[in-house]
Image (cartoon, rainbow, N blue to C red):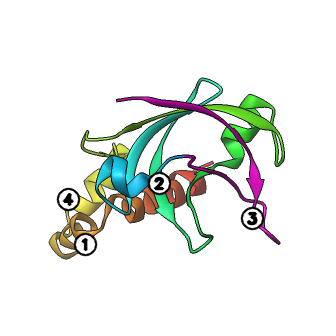
Amino acid sequence: MIYEFEAIIQKVPDKDATFIEIPFDVETEFNAKRIKVKAKFDGVKYRGSIVNMGLGCYIIGITKAIRKEIGKEALDKVFVEIEKDEEERVIELPGDFKNAINENEEAMKFYESLPYSSKKKYYQWITGAKK
């Protein structure tokens, strides 16, 4: 099921971070408290999670890159589409990193033990350093 709604982009105080509030009962709809989702913000695709960050509501963050692509910031209205993401999340490693980690069994075991979000951070750190 795809949920569609308009939302106001909210700013995280003292940070360059934004989010939108989810306007329905997340626990009832998804029978969970943290849900991996595929979202679109004004048609721009994003894979993330709906979470409760102690703000009294469920939220999903909007990255700086997405805000730039859609030309919107805090207090702007955005059209949102959300659906539960049941696909496996996989990161395609750069060839040189893949070769190096395959040569070190301990490093490979460590990397494989990480959750997707941590693997993604390592990927961004490694590919960012190459630029």
Neighbours of disc 2 within 10 Å: few (<14), some (14-19), many (20+): many
| Contact between labelled residues 4 and 3, with CB atoms less than 8 Å apart | no
> Which of the numbered marks, if any, corresponds to residue 102?
4
Crowding around mark 4 (Cα neighbors within 10 Å: few <14, some 14 to 19, many 20+) is: few
Q: CA distance from mark 3 to mark 4?
A: 40 Å
- Separation of residues labelled 1 and 3 (CA atoms): 36 Å
Observer-side mark, 1 or 3, equals 3
Q: Is residue 80 above or below residue 116?
A: above
Q: What are the residue bounds of the magenta stretch?
A: 1-23
Residue named by callout 2: 50
Q: Report, in whole angstroms, how far the alpha carbon at label 2 lies from the one at label 1.
A: 31 Å
For the residue marked with disc 1, what is the amino acid? Ala
Query: In the drawing, what numbered circle is on residue 29?
Result: none
Identified by mark 3, the residue type is Val
* Label located before the other in sequence (4 or 2): 2
Name the residue beneath numbered marker 1: 107
Tell which of 103 and 22 is nearer to you. Answer: 22
- In space, the residues marked 4 and 2 are separated at their CA atoms by 34 Å
Q: Residue 56: x and y, percent?
A: 59, 69
